[in-house]
Image (cartoon, rainbow, N blue to C red):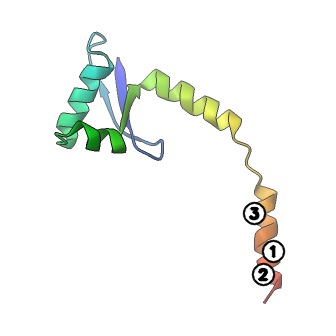
Amino acid sequence: MKYVLVDSHDYINTKVELASDVGISGATTYFKGVKRMPKDEEFDKLWRVMTEEQYLTQYTVSLQNKQHEWWKEEKEITDSELEY
């Protein structure tokens, strides 16, 4: 099964394929060793461990829920340019 290490900005930092019986806790132990972070609290503040499938599902859903209103950004740029 593929596991991913996700940063605080929801980007995948590292992927690994481990035996499926390892689970999230085993993948977390693996990533802690890779990042050389012995303290659980520090690791948990910076990273999340999940399966690649969980990540893709969560990322797809969050993209569908976001509505990018580019026209508002364009208006702000135009308004600020007109002030000069």
Q: Are marks 2 and 1 in contact (CB under 8 Å)?
A: yes
- Name above or below for residue 40 compared with residue 22: below
Quadrant containing the C terminus in the rendered view? bottom right
Residue most extreme to the front: 41
Quarter location, residue 83? bottom right
Residue position marked by numbered label 1 in the rendering: 78
Please state which amino acid type lies under the numbered disc 2.
Glu
Residue position marked by numbered label 2 in the rendering: 81
Give the Cα separation between the discs numbered 1 and 3.
Answer: 9 Å
Residue drawn at point x = 40 percent, y = 43 percent: 7
Residue position marked by numbered label 3 in the rendering: 73
Q: Position of residue 45 (x, y in %)?
A: 35, 43
Quadrant containing the N terminus in the rendered view? top left
Question: Which circle's residue, 1 or 3, is located before the other in the chain?
Answer: 3
- Name above or below for residue 7 compared with residue 30: below
Please state which amino acid type lies under the numbered disc 1.
Thr
Q: Position of residue 34 (x, y in %)?
A: 20, 38
| Label 1, residues with CA under 10 Å away: few <14, some 14-19, many ≥20 | few
Q: Nearer the viewer, residue 53 or 39?
A: 39
Quarter location, residue 32? top left
Q: Are marks 3 and 2 in contact (CB under 8 Å)?
A: no
Q: Position of residue 37 (x, y in %)?
A: 19, 42
- Name above or below for residue 7 compared with residue 53: below
Residue drawn at point x = 16 percent, y = 39 percent: 38
Residue drawn at point x = 48 percent, y = 29 percent: 55
Give the Cα separation between the discs numbered 3 and 2.
Answer: 12 Å
Disc 2 is placed on an element classified as: helix
Disc 3 is placed on an element classified as: helix
* In-image side of 17 versus 69 (left or right): left
Q: Are marks 1 and 3 in contact (CB under 8 Å)?
A: no
Disc 1 is placed on an element classified as: helix
Give the Cα separation between the discs numbered 2 and 1.
Answer: 5 Å
